Amino acid sequence: MIRVLAVLALAATQVVGHGYVPQIQIGSNWYAGWDVTKDPYTSPAPLRPVRRTPNDSGFISDVTSSRITCSIGNEYLPAGGTLSVAAGATVYVHWNTWPDGHYGISQDTYSGGKWGNQRLVANNFTAAVTIPSKLAAGNYLLRHENLALHGATSLNGAQFYPVCIHLTVTGGGSVSPSGLAFPGAYKQNDPGILFNPYQGDAANQAYVAPGGAVYKF
């Protein structure tokens, strides 16, 4: 059984040339992700622990679509194995780029006048995801997502960019969260999806990410 661990990164403003995840780092080891500039044009297509993303890094807008889970990745299975990571270790998700003007969050929401994706950009397009030390060993799907909010003032205007990474967690404890169901975790009119990011600092500070509360270990 594969359980879903969801990490959300939100962005707001205009969308141009979104990124993808060509590399994953665990400790001193680097692993190939899915590189849209090379992998789709290789025959046979390489098997990667990161599920395939669109060639144009395009978005998903329908939260009821099966593509909300892993973009087009569910249509190209099996993926290429899994990455082993010890509970308590950190997985570094390296995006190739993300537009600096895309204000956003990552369950890190809005703080200090900045969205989380601005911190992603400042950190060399790298998101650090620590695997909880109490998490039970097993197979997991790490879902890292950018959500562009620049058009989110209109229904169906939010743009989702999910990336899924296969992990096998070793060691750890006995905590086994139920995870999230996609589709199902989001509704199109959730306050964190139908949202005006241009109301100013106070409104942005009050922003609540979609998907429910973060699990407490």
Image (cartoon, helix red, strand yellow):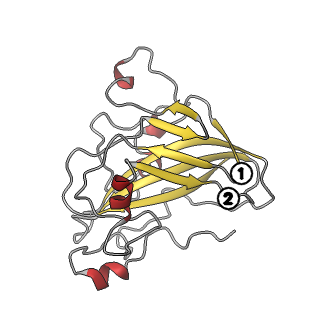
Asked whether residue 193 is in view, the answer is: yes
The reply to whether dot 2 and dot 1 touch (C-beta < 8 Å) is: yes
Percent of width and height locating residue 116: 38, 64
Residue for point 31% across, 74% down: 113
Work out whether 9 lies above or below 110. above
Q: CA distance from mark 2 to mark 1?
A: 6 Å
Q: Residues within 10 Å of mark 1 (few under 14, many from 20)?
A: many
Amino acid at circle 2: Pro
Residue at 69 percent of width and 68 percent of height: 217
For image coordinates 52% across by 29% down, the residue present is: 48
Left or right: residue 174 compared with residue 9: right
Image height of 113 relative to 32, above or below: below
In-front residue for pair 182/131: 131
Residue 34 drawn at (x, y percent): 43, 32
Between residues 106 and 181, which one lies in front from this camera angle? 106
Secondary structure found at label 1? loop
Q: What's the mark number on residue 132?
A: 2
Residue drawn at 48 percent across, 45 percent down: 93
Q: Residue furthest top?
A: 43
Within the image, what quadrant is residue 132 found in?
bottom right
> Which residue is disc 1 drawn over?
87
Amino acid type, callout 1: Ala
In terms of secondary structure, where does tag 2 sit?
A: loop
- What is the number of callouts on the image? 2
**Left or right of residue 19: residue 73:** right
Q: How far across and how far down the image is residue 20, in percent? A: 36, 41
- Compare residues 80 and 134 and report the one nearer the observer: 134
Q: Residues within 10 Å of mark 2 (few under 14, many from 20)?
A: some
Q: Quadrant of the N terminus?
A: top right
| Residue 51 visible in the current orientation | no
